[in-house]
Amino acid sequence: MLAAAVIEAVEAAGILLAAILAGIATAAGHSYQTGSGIAITLIALGAAVLLAVVAQGLRRARRWSRTPAVLTQLFAGIVAIYLVQSGKLDWGIPGIVLAVGGIGALLSPASVRLLTPGRIEKN
């Protein structure tokens, strides 16, 4: 379970880094339109905060955190594949590794036991 929380936190940090880089590019005038650069920066900052909240929920084994964590991994995997296809291997390959690791950690037997309400173990 800790692995899933760590992976979610690393993804939150990655999005925070991307938001900071987008903000710097916008401030330097390298955005196509200033308004869209500001919007992307703010959306990414909000996403980073939400992912950090989900990571905290996973760390505390809160059942509500499973669905957003799985969706995060699916979305991160899709985005990472697009990054690899567009030649951004430095962001895409780590993204794929994190997404696969995150799904694996969330579907591990220990995580399933902790995060599934009313689950009855079969002997």
Image (spheres, rainbow, N blue to C red):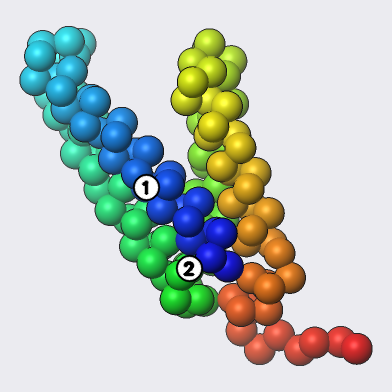
Residue 87, horizontal then vertical, whole percent = 53, 11
**In the displayed structure, does residue 61 sit left or right of residue 112?**
left
Q: Residues within 10 Å of mark 2 (few under 14, many from 20)?
A: many
Which one is earlier in the sequence, the residue at label 2 or at label 1? 1
Q: Please, what secondary structure does the residue beneath circle 2 have? A: helix
Q: Is residue 95 above or below residue 30?
A: below
Q: Is residue 123 above or below residue 95?
A: below
Residue 84, horizontal then vertical, whole percent = 57, 19
In the rendered structure, are the residues bearing label 2 and label 1 in contact, judged by CB atoms less than 8 Å apart? no
**In the displayed structure, does residue 67 sit left or right of residue 12?**
right
Disc 1 marks which amino acid?
Ala
Q: Residues within 10 Å of mark 1 (few under 14, many from 20)?
A: many
The residue depicted at 56 percent of the width and 59 percent of the height is 3
Which quadrant is the N terminus positioned in? bottom right
Q: Is residue 50 above or below residue 31?
A: below
Which quadrant is the C terminus positioned in? bottom right
Whole-Å distance between the Cαs marked 2 and 1?
13 Å
Q: Which residue is mark 1?
A: 12
Residue 68 in view here: no
Residue 98, horizontal then vertical, whole percent = 56, 42
* Number of the label disc, if any, that sits on residue 118: none
The residue depicted at 62 percent of the width and 61 percent of the height is 106
**In the displayed structure, does residue 106 sit left or right of residue 21?**
right
Examine the image and state in which quarter residue 60 appears: bottom left
> Residue 67 or 57: which is nearer the viewer?
57
The residue depicted at 61 percent of the width and 79 percent of the height is 114
Q: Which residue is mark 2?
A: 58
> Residue 63 or 91: which is nearer the viewer?
91
Disc 2 marks which amino acid?
Leu
The residue depicted at 68 percent of the width and 73 percent of the height is 110
